[in-house]
Image (tube, coloured by chain):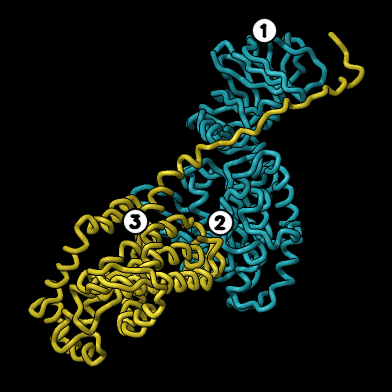
Chain colours: A cyan, B yellow
């Protein structure tokens, strides 16, 4: 069902990007991006700085024109519409609140520009939604960062856009406030039921809030999926390294039997589920998340059927309360991370000889020709 | 290891009595400026005010006789001059603002890495003497110059003459020439404050405007203009105040029918033996008049908190 409002827009519909490309001279910021964002979803574009996520967002808002490609909102093509004609609103990175207007007028701004006469009730309701009704008469500079953030959200939401774009909305807040706002944003999105497209470099932020995440790299989407899906089944080394941490071990396939692929890595036999392998022949990269790996002092402690790597030596131990993080050096020189939950087991000191092991169903196999370090640096950069 | 079983007893703590120390540095820093203003501003103003109610002449000396009639002479005899001073300076301010705003806007938002260079270009002409630049306008507006030829060939000169802006077939020695000279000379004073206040505006506010249903014009009207008001007020004041007292442009580019207050004051002071009192009274009238206009303007603009 669709109805037309004052702007002549149709309500409802998915946001579709078709072959969207943006070039600046010889630099391609966004490369042939095609994407459908279902109506009412909380969608995150995740990537390191310069991956094209913000450019994509700006093209959706109309602040940037695509070099090639189309943007659809439901049935309507909006590619050539001026930003002020699009039923889309943005929460800007540094909020961009109008300093000469008080909070009430900032929030009322969009309504007034569209000629809405009686704004008082809507603005009051919106300020209540973000729990800042008592600050209506203040100027933006008199508000804290978190409050400004919420006003920026209210200023955009009040227009009931079909799509709300959030450009690193929590980037300027401190960690504690960011956690709080993540929950708040998710609550508001559920309450208003609008499509949120959220750009961030913070994987934790994306995982906490989004229904669907698109991991972007070099202007392309590396992988698209639910947070759990991306985490458990990364498609590339970039995703495996960027989203959380991964132990990635080069290995070669020896055979496949009953849905299990046998591989050898540094002369040790390992197994991985076929359905979790992106490639089942030749060289592959075997991955496993650090928290899935366990540590033992003796080969005999390893349960039957588990993958085990012997000859490891603890080179670093950090006890952080809920868990202990080990760095284990293998005879090949490779270092593996192990996060062991604090279950009361003895902590291994650096220098201890250990065996690391994990359930083969928890590993994953990636295509072997990729850069094994891809995404690791980007992740560090994003975390900084 | 010791265990704390109870909170330690509060320590009696009282700051020792100390004389509050006065910091004299700010006052010392103010002193040179205050001295300068006293000697070269306050004293001359008081002496002007005093001279405006004196009588006498150059040979017999002037006496303070509280001769308030000087003010009657200063106002009643020079109506056209006050009118010219006011109209020319207002026109200059308006034209300057109209020319300066787009220039300042362009440099501030589109100047990119050329900003500094472009602003230097705005200021560079001021390195030449004010007088020489004004005299140069005599050449620009001369009867056989391009301006006159162009205007004449487009038959515009007849219109401007009919409007009283130009005289006969000349542009020089006319009200238009005076205003042109003033606009040229004061334009940088309008551009500078405007640029400073436009440059401070976050360009993302323009994007926020576009995002919130503003066309380019509405964005300017609702966001840029209000935020640049301090620059508009500053620029117009920095133009209007010197323009209202300027008489060089009227003297060099005008005619006997374009005389402004400054020219009469100069005449009374330098060429009349008994002109001091009335000349001083005219100065005081100008000063008070300008002050009233400026204060009303600032008050009406309602931007005390922006200034």
Local secondary structure at mark 3? loop
Which is closer to the viewer, label 1 or label 2?
Answer: 2
Looking at the figure, which quarter contains the N terminus of chain A? bottom right
The image shows residue B156 at horizontal and vertical percentages of 20, 87
Chain for disc number 1: A
- B123 with respect to A12 (left or right): left
For label 2, the residue is A96
Q: How would you rate the neighbour count of disc 3 (Cα within 10 Å): few for under 14, some for 14-19, many for 20 or more? A: some
Chain for disc number 3: B
Can residue B214 be spotted in the picture? Answer: no
Taking the view exactly as shown, the residue that stands out farthest to the right is: B5
Observer-nearest of A20 and A367: A20
Looking at the figure, which quarter contains the C terminus of chain A? top right
Distance of label 1 from label 2 (alpha carbons): 56 Å
Observer-nearest of A75 and B160: B160
The image shows residue B229 at horizontal and vertical percentages of 48, 65
Where is residue B163, by image quadrant? bottom left
Which is closer to the viewer, label 1 or label 3?
Answer: 3
For residue A353, which numbered disc appears in the image? 1
Tag 2–tag 3 contact (CB < 8 Å): no
For label 3, the residue is B111
Dot placed on the residue nearer the N-terminal end, 1 or 2: 2
Local secondary structure at mark 1? strand
For residue A182, which numbered disc appears in the image? none
């Amino acid at each position: 069902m669709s109805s037309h409002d004052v702007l002549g827009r149709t309500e409802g519909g998915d946001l579709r990007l078709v072959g969207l490309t943006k070039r600046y001279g010889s630099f391609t910021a966004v490369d042939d991006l095609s994407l459908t964002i279902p109506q009412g979803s909380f969608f995150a574009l995740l990537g390191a700085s310069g991956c094209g996520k913000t450019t994509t967002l700006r093209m959706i808002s109309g602040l940037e024109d695509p070099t090639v490609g189309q943007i659809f909102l439901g049935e309507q093509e909006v590619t050539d519409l001026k930003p002020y004609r699009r039923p889309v609103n943005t929460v800007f990175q540094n909020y961009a609140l109008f300093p000469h207007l008080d909070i009430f007028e900032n929030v009322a701004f969009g309504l007034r520009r569209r000629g809405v006469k009686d704004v008082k009730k809507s603005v009051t309701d919106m300020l209540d939604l973000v729990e800042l009704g008592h600050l209506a008469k203040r100027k933006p500079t008199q508000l804290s960062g978190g409050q400004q953030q919420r006003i920026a959200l209210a200023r955009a939401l009040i227009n009931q856009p079909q799509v709300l774009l959030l450009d690193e909305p929590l980037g300027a807040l401190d960690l504690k406030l960011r956690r709080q706002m993540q929950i708040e944003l998710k609550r508001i999105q559920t309450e208003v039921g609008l499509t949120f497209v959220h750009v961030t470099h913070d994987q934790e932020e994306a995982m906490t809030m989004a229904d669907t995440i698109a991991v972007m790299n070099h202007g392309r989407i590396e992988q698209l999926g639910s947070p759990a899906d991306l985490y458990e089944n990364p498609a590339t080394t970039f995703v495996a390294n960027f989203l959380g941490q991964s132990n990635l071990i080069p290995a070669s396939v020896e055979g496949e039997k009953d849905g299990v692929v046998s591989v050898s890595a540094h002369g040790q036999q390992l197994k991985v589920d076929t359905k979790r392998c992106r490639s089942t022949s030749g060289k592959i990269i075997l991955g496993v998340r650090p928290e899935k790996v366990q540590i033992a002092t003796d080969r005999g402690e390893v349960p039957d059927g588990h993958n085990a790597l012997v000859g490891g030596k603890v080179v670093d131990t950090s006890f952080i309360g809920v868990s202990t993080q080990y760095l284990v050096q293998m005879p090949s020189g490779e270092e593996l991370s192990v996060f062991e939950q604090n279950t009361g087991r003895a902590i291994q000191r650096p220098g201890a000889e250990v065996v690391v092991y994990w359930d083969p169903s928890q590993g994953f196999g990636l295509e072997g020709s990729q850069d094994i370090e891809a995404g690791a640096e980007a992740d560090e950069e994003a975390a900084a | 290891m010791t265990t704390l079983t109870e909170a330690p007893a509060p320590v009696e703590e009282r700051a020792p009595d100390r004389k509050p120390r006065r910091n004299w540095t700010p006052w010392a820093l103010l002193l040179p400026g205050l001295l300068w203003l006293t000697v070269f501003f306050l004293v001359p103003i008081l002496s002007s005010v005093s001279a405006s109610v004196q009588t006498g002449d150059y040979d017999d000396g002037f006496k303070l006789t509280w001769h308030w009639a000087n003010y009657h002479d200063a106002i009643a005899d020079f109506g056209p001059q006050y009118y010219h001073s006011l109209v020319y300076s207002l026109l200059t301010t308006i034209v300057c603002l109209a020319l300066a705003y787009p220039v300042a806007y362009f440099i501030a938002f589109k100047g990119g890495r050329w900003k500094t260079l472009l602003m230097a270009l705005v200021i560079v002409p001021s390195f030449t003497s004010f007088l020489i630049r004004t005299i140069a306008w005599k050449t620009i507006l001369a009867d056989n110059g391009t301006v006159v030829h162009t205007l004449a060939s487009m038959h515009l000169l007849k219109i401007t003459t009919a409007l009283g802006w130009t005289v006969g077939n000349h542009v020089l020695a006319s009200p238009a020439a005076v205003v042109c000279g003033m606009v040229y000379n004061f334009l940088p004073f309008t551009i500078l404050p405007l640029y400073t206040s436009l440059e401070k505006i976050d360009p993302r506010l323009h994007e926020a405007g576009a995002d919130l249903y503003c066309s380019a014009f509405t964005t300017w009207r609702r966001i840029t203009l209000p935020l640049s008001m301090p620059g508009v007020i500053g620029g117009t004041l920095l133009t209007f105040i010197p323009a209202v007292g300027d008489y060089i442009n009227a003297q060099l580019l005008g005619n006997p029918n374009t005389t402004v207050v400054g020219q009469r004051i100069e005449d009374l002071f330098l060429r009349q033996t008994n002109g001091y009192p009335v000349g001083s009274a005219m100065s005081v009238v100008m000063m008070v008049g300008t002050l009233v206009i400026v204060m009303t303007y600032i008050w009406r603009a309602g931007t005390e908190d922006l200034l």
